[in-house]
Image (cartoon, helix red, strand yellow):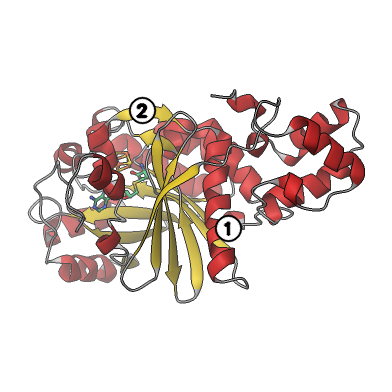
Amino acid sequence: MSVSGNSLLGLTFAELESVLVADGVLAHHAKQLWSTIHRQAAADPSSVPLSPPLAKWVAENIGEGKNRFIDLPEQAEEIHSSDGLTRKYLLRLADGQVIETVLMEYGGRFTACVSSQAGCAMGCVFCATGQMGFVRHLTVGEIVAQVLHVRRALAASHPHRRLRNLVLMGMGEPLHNYDAVMKAMDIVSNPRGCAIGAAHIAISTVGYVPNILRMAEEQRPYRLAVSLHGSTEAERSALVPASKKWDLETLIAACRSYSRDTGKRIFFEWTLIAGKNDSEETARRLAVLLEGIDSHVNLIPLNPTEGYDGHSSSSGRAFQETLRQAGIPCTFRQRRGIDVAAGCGMLKAAKFHNIAKP
Ligand code: SAH
Ligand code: SF4
């Protein structure tokens, strides 16, 4: 496997420029190479017309056996949902790890859901990725490559549409891989590249408190989504073991301080599970917990996974109504792509543990 530091996809524009300058190529050629890689999403820059000095550098430096590479993963599988609105890609990385990336269409707008780790260390009981355990962090290049993969797929099917939104809700806990995720987001939000507006990027965390605070301190321009799933410590830690490390009270205090310091709304994710966290009493407690925080609650129907025997709730409407009456905006996340096993970690689990696909 090549050294990830030599991946061109892991470089910011300024870093790419200094690589070229160090090799004696004039700085202004960096714009052309950047645009080839990130705007056009060209899989192979040597296949597109480039100015002669840049073409020479590309021929000498990029590719198999050379000192730089573009770490595009190999597509192991592509599955489309029956309504055609969700496509799921299984991507094989250089060391054989397989991750998933999803492209979703909502009312003509396209959103990518990307992974930040192979597996996840947080162990949420209902999550297929959590059930797999942690394998490794993804590199910056591997995160950026997922966005480019999806953009190429979109260009092929809808040449005039662009990828507008990005959510870090695939495999892994993005705030556990903070530096790589933040650098990858800097790269994909660059207006001369993928140009995904920072306000259209959502980072979803299980509640990794120190790095929620760090996002605020560093004034990261992205949206924050916090996966809550429980209104008391007991309710939450039964589903989210990470709550033992960063308990509910500490997490809510961190959200309060994030909200105060950034002035930004926080999206709270809530996977509804029958008999575990779906009662009206829980909804009322949640409303009290979120008092004073500019919040929006997203309710997610439970996707079935092999390792968890909980059931999807049928009292979601009452839960939603209780929150709304308390003045908290609350919507249902569409159960997108469940027929392509597009729930978090589901397709990989289905494919690699021989579970029948739904
Ligand atoms: N690790 C991050 C982001 C990835 S998970 C986080 O936990 O927030 C993205 C969302 O999918 C989280 O809200 C998670 O709780 C939810 N999720 C995971 N498995 C699920 C399942 N089987 N059914 C419904 N939602 C699930
Ligand atoms: Fe990890 Fe998120 Fe799954 Fe929890 S829900 S195990 S944090 S990926």
Q: Is residue 237 above or below residue 280?
A: above
- Asked whether mark 2 and ligand 2 are closer than 8 Å, the reply comes as no
Q: Is residue 165 left or right of residue 329?
A: right
* Residue identifier under label 1: 152
Residue at mark 1 to residue at mark 2: CA–CA distance: 27 Å
Which x, y percent locates residue 357? Answer: 21, 55
Rate crowding at label 2 as few (under 14), some (14 to 19) or many (20 or more) other CA atoms within 10 Å. Answer: few
The residue lying at 84 percent from left, 42 percent from top is: 55
Element under disc 2 = strand
Q: Is residue 226 left or right of residue 214?
A: left
Amino acid marked by disc 1: Arg
The residue lying at 37 percent from left, 40 percent from top is: 253
Q: Is residue 243 left or right of residue 20?
A: left
Q: Is residue 282 above or below residue 63?
A: below
The residue lying at 83 percent from left, 35 percent from top is: 57
The residue lying at 28 percent from left, 65 percent from top is: 335
Amino acid marked by disc 2: Val
* Residue identifier under label 2: 135
